[in-house]
Image: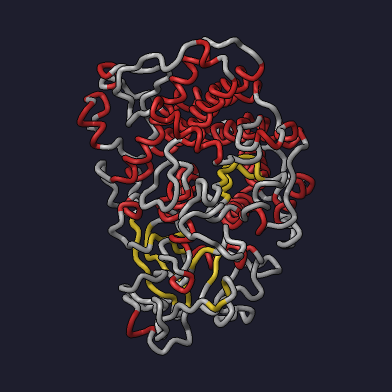
Amino acid sequence: MKHFKFQYIIAASLFASFMGACSLERTPLSNIADNEFWNNPNRASMALTALYRGEITNGVEFSPSDFWSYGGFLYTEHISDNGFDRRGENAPYFQISSGKLLNNNNMIRIYWRAAYHRIENCNRFLRDIASANQTDEVKRMTAEARFLRATQYHYLASYFKDVPLVTTGLTNKQSNNVKKTTQADILKFCADEFKAAANDLPTFGNMSANDKGRACKQAALAFLGRTYMLMQQWTNGADTYKQIINLGENAIHPHYRELFWPKTGTDNKENIFYIAYMANYFGCGMPQHLMSAKDNGWSSSNASGGLFEAYEFTDGTPFSYDDPRYNPNNLGENRDPRLDYTIYYNGATFKGTTYIISPDSSAAKKQRLDYATEASKTGFLWRKYFNEERIEDITSYSAVTPIIRYAEVLLSYLECQLESGQPITQALLDQTINAIRGRGDVNMPPITETNVDKLREILRHERRIELAYEGIRYWDLLRWRIAHEVLTGPIWGAPYPNSAGYAQTTKQIDPTGHCRWYVGRRDFRNPQDYTWPIPLSEQNINPNLREE
């Protein structure tokens, strides 16, 4: 499975007209093909590829189109403490975690629709392929469809909690009367499906080059592990992640940066399951959104000051503005190398030229830090996903966005061991968190702490740094039940202690005296914002989904 090649999607688009759906599918179903169709491997494979595509769009994405599109996946960082949506505090995305989430929020409606669209297509695929001769390849495709369907229920259960569990095609009348299933039962369904899929999928090491883009056993086991973590079944989670480790086919890649670049992001042993766009065929508009005006981008997605401050000094001690190693003129100096691999800042070189973003800037092309120009609102932008080579078309880029990395597997295994009460040994730390911190181009000091309470905080910190801007942080904050603590209060951006105009231009002066730029404020409501409301459009159609 290494790589979701979007050449397949071109053919799949032709099939999509047969697989069309919206929300909880309300179009009466009929057989889309006879047995001869499903016994033809090429046709069945084309239908399967449509399931992988889901609602992912080609080119620039103005709203999240799918849980796995770049806008739907990476932009969840905007609703965590890692990022900020340049469109501001009134943006629908920002409102999800700012105390203003309502059931008419368009973003959660899109996620709901995309998930059930893919689920319905999986249901139809599974129904029809059951009529084919049950060859090994058909069994494998069946497992892939079950895996893909379960991933969507995993996301729905993570955010919406209690949702309808639909495993067969529905008529209009049936879909308008489905009832919610509890989160616990949804997660049990997911666990069963991931286990069944893992049994019939080839392992990562047995995937051929032609299989790039298809699910493997390790991907199914990793999602099973995530499911157990949501269920807080820590022993089962540890056992599941240990299966991946014991297979011995994955490893920490020596170069952190390469995991997110075209070409190198698709051929390594760490990226287990990911989306790889292909420029000029099915590319993505990530450069258009993420890069600054100097590179013809829109600066739409901004890293937060809180994430910047989370990166340790190179000796493993916490960052402090009062430490003499802090250099306000070079924010990455003396810091964990992953800072410069992930974000860039005022004065940094990106794509061969200097990035300027300051309250004092008089430069052209939207480089002044304020509340009006189309520039970063935090002073930070994302370097991750760009190898800084020339991009021919910033609206069609060959981005690689990991869904499952082996680094996450190791950190999750350690968390499951810790939470299940197993002894924490140095050998376990070296096998997991230290293997990640010790990769070749990171080389951070090893962790030796074995006290459970202290190690828990260290582990959570490491997940934030290692998996930054990979669509994990918000999910972590929810399942740890600390979102109401972390996502409440002012949002700060980059520091500008030498700025002449800072005090006159920032909306609020940094009370710490470190001259951080004021960005905005979050007010995450507990417990209300831990559960996304079912979209109002669905409630209006189906009275069983209405909320009291």
Residue 1: % across, % down? 65, 35
Q: Which of the 4 quarters of the picture holds residue 105?
A: top left
Residue 32 can be seen in this image:
yes
Question: In the displayed structure, would residue 533 be above or below residue 163?
Answer: below
Residue 481 can be seen in this image:
no
Q: Nearer the viewer, residue 499 or 106?
A: 106
Residue 499: % across, % down? 44, 86
Q: Left or right? Give the position of 536 relative to 263.
A: left
Q: Which of the 4 quarters of the picture holds residue 341?
A: bottom right
Question: In the displayed structure, would residue 469 be above or below residue 364?
Answer: above
In the rendered image, the quadrant that contains the C terminus is top left
Residue 217: % across, % down? 66, 29
Q: Left or right? Give the position of 276 relative to 545.
A: right
Q: Left or right? Give the position of 67 relative to 206.
A: left
**Residue occupying image coordinates x 48% and y 51%:** 284
**Residue occupying image coordinates x 55% and y 36%:** 8
Q: Nearer the viewer, residue 376 or 60?
A: 60
Question: In the displayed structure, would residue 198 be above or below residue 476?
Answer: above
Question: Residue reaching furthest bottom?
Answer: 500
Q: Nearer the viewer, residue 110 or 314?
A: 110
Q: Left or right? Give the position of 517 relative to 239.
A: left
